Amino acid sequence: MSKAVSNAAIDLVALDAKWISRWKKLSNNTFINPRKLIKPKHEKKKYSLCMFPYPSGMLHIGHLRVYTISDVLSRYYRMKGYDVINPMGWDAFGLPAENAAVEREVSPEDWTKSNIAKMKQQMEMMRVDFDWDREVTTCNPDYYKWTQKIFLLMYEHGLAYRKKAEVNWDPVDNTVLANEQVDAEGRSWRSGAIVEKKLLEQWFLGITKFAGDLSNDLELLPEWPSKVKVMQKHWIGQMFNTLP
């Protein structure tokens, strides 16, 4: 490389725009787009689901790593003739997004929607092949009406109930934490605050009633790694100890 070229400033924004434009054109070609390359054989199906991001900020390198894996797998199976569902959505009805908005003194709705737009733009630059026609946003009424319906059905069948119990309380985020969200030093996984123990009345879901079935049905998952099934058995075993 000549000295003149090596010392020249590189316009990374223009470089991105150039290659994204070329990739879009290639994506309409069967060489790149497996949806057009092979007609899916509907008896062969794959569901490729990665965790939906919290729209409390912008995507970071961790998201890029995870979604690249999902993208590679979905493209691979499509090219093998599978009918693949590879959806994307936004875990937008939670405390992280709300707290981020409060810190910035903006409307949680405006903050969340603007971050979703930014994240979609970032995914566009990544050229990930998600099924955007299946996109869900959990803070939209057309989504959470179904979670509300499920809760009401569980309540009607005695699977949702209130009682007092000791909980892990994050004094910064003002929320209850699961045991898995408290680190070895007793700090919150998000805020870093020392977690307090509180006796609160709260809602519970009666999943302990299904602990036996959950444990037995792990034998029906031969493709799961043994270490994952052992972890699940230990977790389900803890459920037996908390039966009401």
Image: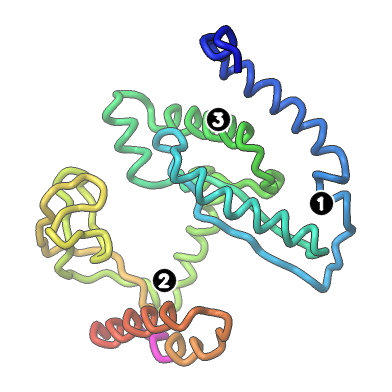
Mark closest to the chain's N terminus, 3 or 2: 3
Q: Write down the residue under mark 3.
A: 117
Q: Position of residue 62 (x, y in %)?
A: 44, 45
Q: Write down the residue under mark 2.
A: 155
Q: Position of residue 200 (x, y in %)?
A: 16, 62
The amino acid marked with disc number 1 is Pro
Q: Write down the residue under mark 1.
A: 34
Asked if labels 2 and 3 touch by Cβ distance under 8 angstroms, the answer is: no
| Closer to the eye: label 3 or 2 | 3
The amino acid marked with disc number 2 is Tyr
Q: In which quarter of the image is the N terminus?
A: top right
Cα–Cα span, label 3 and label 2 = 36 Å
| Closer to the eye: label 3 or 1 | 1
The part of the chain drawn in magenta is 208-212
Mark closest to the chain's N terminus, 3 or 1: 1
Report whether 123 appears left or right of 194.
right
Cα–Cα span, label 3 and label 1 = 27 Å
